């Protein structure tokens, strides 16, 4: 029996909620985490038509990219589409889960979809997120060092970019301590307390994603041989190159401005593109960001991008291109719609025996004439 929490826990291992922006409201918004799942409907936005589609297709869990609730709701009277959607979902016993800026901010998320659509090569996070890493330093007896090290790696410590099981162990040093008669002496339990003891200890250091801190400390305390262990957790300034906003990479070949816009239109299935004035240099290096990504323009220019592909660009923002870069606004919906397939593929890897459907309801609120 697969429960809502089984699905959401799996998604949060992939796109941790800790990586969402402070203004966001990703996670389980409506529903019981212990409810058995009959089917899952994937969509970009939640509307009344989406809730009806889920009900008609016997899907009692909706997974959307955009949260239906951003601001606190003080009343549920059905006066707007947000309230009506929540009322509908509760009436039909349908849970709603959203995976928003946490999916934007991981390497394998929204922006990877766009990068793959455009065939980008050697791409990386455009603006890595700071303050997401911590370092654990702990002192361990030489007899337990490998066991403690393995336990920390198992809960996620020591994963750095494409590497795992990373750690640093200093050569053995000497530690001193004095304990009372009730304490457990790790070196020789038969010894009595009330005297200064000398023991050999290794210093073990591991880097980890900050959101794992509680799990790592809990695992350490469960396994560490000392009754009172000596450890330290530090915030480190290194940006996690696997977490952050946007992507920058290179096209398989160089395009002139017009040919690139045609290529962009074809690859992303667009009906139109809003863009800044053409630039005088060819297009090779591409910066991109699904949704509203114009805030990345200075960083895209700094890293030498020839074009920034994003959405929701305001009139005056186009002036900021300053003939240095081409800004291409492909539309918010159009930049993110491919993530239905992304989430579908991810869930299919783990839950092959559950109904998993991509919504057929069109939710783009913007129409083109």
Image (cartoon, rainbow, N blue to C red):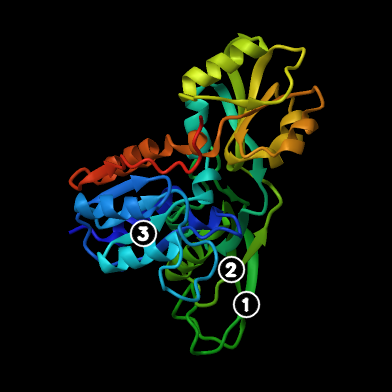
Q: How many residues crowd mark 2 within 10 Å: few (<14), some (14–19), many (20+)? A: some
Residue at 77%, 28% in the rendered image: 321
Residue at 43%, 70% in the rendered image: 222
Q: Which mark is residue 177?
A: 1
Q: Position of residue 195 (x, y in %)?
A: 61, 84
Closer to viewer: mark 3 or mark 1: 3
Q: Is residue 34 left or right of residue 44?
A: left
- Give the Cα separation between the discs numbered 2 and 1: 8 Å
Q: Answer with the quarter of the image where residue 347 lies.
A: top left
Q: Nearer the viewer, residue 186 or 105?
A: 105
Q: Earlier in the sequence, mark 3 or mark 2?
A: 3
57 w.r.t. 137: above or below:
above
331 w.r.t. 62: above or below:
above
| Residue labelled with disc 3 | 96
Q: Residues at badges 2 and 1 in contact (C-beta under 8 Å)?
A: yes
| Residue 162 seen by the camera | no
- Give the Cα separation between the discs numbered 3 and 2: 55 Å
Mark 3: secondary structure: strand
Residue at 47%, 70% in the rendered image: 221
Check the picture and name the quadrant holding the N terminus.
Answer: bottom left
- Give the Cα separation between the discs numbered 3 and 1: 54 Å
| Residue labelled with disc 2 | 199
Residue at 82%, 27% in the rendered image: 322
Q: Which mark is residue 365?
A: none
């Amino acid at each position: 029996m697969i429960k809502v929490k089984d699905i959401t826990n799996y998604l949060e291992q992939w796109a941790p909620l800790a990586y969402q922006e402070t203004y966001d409201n990703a996670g389980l918004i409506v529903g019981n985490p212990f409810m058995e799942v009959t089917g899952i409907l994937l969509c970009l936005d939640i509307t009344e038509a989406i809730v009806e589609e889920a009900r008609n297709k016997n899907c009692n869990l909706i997974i959307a990219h955009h949260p239906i609730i951003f601001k606190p709701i003080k009343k549920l009277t059905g006066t707007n589409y947000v309230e009506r959607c929540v009322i509908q979902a509760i009436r039909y016993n349908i849970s709603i889960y959203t995976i928003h800026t946490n999916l934007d901010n991981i390497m394998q998320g929204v922006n990877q979809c766009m990068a793959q659509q455009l065939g980008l090569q050697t791409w990386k996070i455009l603006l890595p997120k700071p303050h997401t890493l911590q370092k654990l330093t702990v002192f361990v007896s030489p007899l337990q060092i490998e066991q403690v090290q393995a336990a920390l790696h198992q809960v996620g410590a020591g994963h750095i970019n494409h590497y795992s099981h990373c750690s640093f162990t200093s050569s053995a040093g000497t530690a001193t301590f004095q304990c009372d008669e009730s304490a457990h002496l790790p070196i020789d339990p038969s010894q009595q307390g009330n005297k200064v003891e000398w023991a050999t200890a290794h210093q073990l250091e591991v880097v980890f994603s900050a959101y794992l801190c509680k799990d790592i400390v809990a695992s350490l305390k469960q396994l560490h041989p000392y009754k009172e262990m000596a450890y330290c957790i530090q915030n480190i300034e290194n940006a996690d190159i696997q977490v952050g906003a946007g992507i920058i990479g290179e096209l398989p070949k160089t395009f002139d401005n017009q040919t690139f816009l045609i290529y962009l239109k074809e690859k992303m299935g667009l009906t139109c593109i809003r863009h800044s004035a053409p630039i005088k240099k060819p297009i090779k290096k591409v910066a991109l960001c699904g949704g509203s990504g114009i805030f990345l323009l200075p960083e895209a220019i700094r890293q030498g991008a020839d074009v920034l592909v994003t959405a929701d660009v305001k009139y005056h923002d186009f002036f900021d291109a300053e003939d240095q870069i081409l800004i291409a606004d492909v539309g918010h919906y159009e930049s993110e719609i491919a993530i239905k397939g992304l989430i579908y593929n991810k869930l299919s890897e783990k839950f092959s025996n559950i109904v998993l459907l991509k919504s057929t309801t069109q939710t783009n609120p913007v129409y083109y004439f």
